[in-house]
């Protein structure tokens, strides 16, 4: 009986302390021109990603301080603006916003913006993309929070890890929640990226300026996604489960990143996270062929909850 009592007390104590953790708060600025269905799904997705990949005052001291400062200034931590493509959607807030992304990444108060193209509503696949972009952009906020990054993410880490990660995660989400596998078709399209460049010159995919999204280089981040999946495949060879390997790439790398000062020194975090040097990985990558894609795609049953639990 006494034992039960102690367990009960511990449980009550534990649950009240869990409730008290302050979450990173987003302010939703949703334009009235958005379809109601999109708005409902947006809120639903935001609830899911915040539960699976929480950002709160316990994440680390950098987040805690950042939350304190932004709370003091504006009463919440980050704005999200969303609209169906229109000129100057929130003129009273910010002028001429265009395209989706994390903007103002070098300022103390970056924001997320989601530019939803009306033509995307005419195709069922593109419609899903208007949803998975929410997962993609939230994941950038998560990467940033874990890595204590004040400046823009891709100035401090390889683009293929930043964008390849966000791309692969949004596609795992798409398969899990919408039963659509868009990753395979994107990477299979030859015009989106070059296997020769990816395997022989992966360093080009480390920066936006050397791997533009245009001209068959890294369209829809297909090339970056291929490199990221090859890394997960190599990690699995070290007796890691698929979930564990993805966890290293999606979470642990960014935690390790916080241990290095800002700057182009992510190669050290790479080695500390994955147990191999970047050169060793690129050497392995050089052996990959286009047809290996089938072998390195995430399993169909993979769930984001199992990666981040
Ligand atoms: Zn991105």
Image (tube, rainbow, N blue to C red):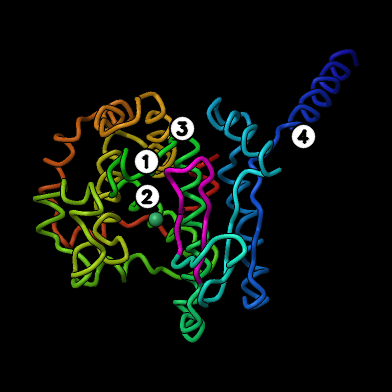
Residue 177, image quadrant: bottom right
Circle 3 or circle 1, nearest the eye: 3
Badge 3 density bin: few <14, some 14–19, many ≥20, Cα 10 Å: many
User: Which quadrant of the rendered structure holds the N terminus?
Assistant: top right
Residue receiving disc 1: 249
Tell me if residue 273 comes above or below residue 129 in the rendering.
above
Residue receiving disc 4: 19
- Name the secondary structure under disc 4: helix
Q: Is residue 104 magenta?
A: yes
Q: Earlier in the sequence, mark 3 or mark 1?
A: 3
Residue receiving disc 2: 165
Magenta part of the protein: which range?
A: 100-115
Q: Is residue 262 magenta?
A: no
Q: Nearer the viewer, residue 101 or 1?
A: 101
Residue 59, image quadrant: top right
Q: Earlier in the sequence, mark 3 or mark 4?
A: 4
Q: Residue at x 22, y 30 (%)?
A: 276
Residue receiving disc 3: 148
In this picture, residue 192 sits left or right of residue 246? left
Position in image of residue 243 (x %, y %): 43, 43
Q: Nearer the viewer, residue 170 or 73?
A: 73
Q: Earlier in the sequence, mark 4 or mark 1?
A: 4
């Amino acid at each position: 009986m006494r034992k039960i009592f102690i367990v009960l007390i511990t449980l009550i104590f534990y649950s009240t302390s869990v409730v008290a953790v302050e979450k990173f708060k987003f302010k939703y600025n949703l334009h009235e021109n958005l379809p109601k269905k999109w708005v409902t799904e947006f809120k639903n997705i935001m609830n899911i990603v915040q539960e699976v990949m929480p950002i709160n005052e316990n994440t680390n001291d950098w987040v805690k301080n950042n939350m304190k400062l932004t709370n003091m200034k504006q009463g919440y931590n980050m704005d999200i603006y969303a609209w169906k493509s229109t000129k100057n959607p929130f003129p009273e807030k910010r002028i001429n916003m265009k395209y989706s992304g994390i903007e103002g990444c070098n300022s103390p108060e970056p924001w997320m913006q989601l530019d939803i193209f009306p033509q995307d509503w005419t195709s069922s696949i593109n419609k899903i993309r208007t949803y998975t972009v929410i997962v993609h952009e939230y994941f950038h906020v998560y990467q940033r929070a874990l890595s204590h990054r004040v400046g823009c993410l891709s100035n401090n880490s390889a683009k293929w890890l930043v964008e390849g990660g966000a791309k692969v995660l949004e596609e795992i989400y798409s398969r899990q929640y919408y039963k659509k596998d868009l990753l395979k078709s994107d990477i299979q399209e030859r015009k989106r990226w070059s296997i020769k460049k990816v395997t022989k010159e992966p360093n080009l995919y480390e920066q936006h300026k050397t791997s533009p999204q245009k001209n068959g280089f890294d369209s829809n981040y297909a090339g970056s996604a291929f490199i990221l999946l090859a890394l997960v495949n190599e990690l699995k060879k070290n007796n890691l489960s698929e979930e564990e390997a993805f966890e290293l790439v999606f979470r642990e790398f960014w935690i390790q990143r916080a241990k290095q000062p800002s700057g182009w020194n992510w190669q050290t975090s790479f080695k500390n996270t994955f147990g191999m040097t970047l050169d060793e990985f690129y050497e392995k990558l050089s052996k990959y062929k286009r047809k290996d894609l089938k072998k390195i795609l995430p399993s169909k049953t993979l769930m984001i909850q199992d990666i981040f639990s």
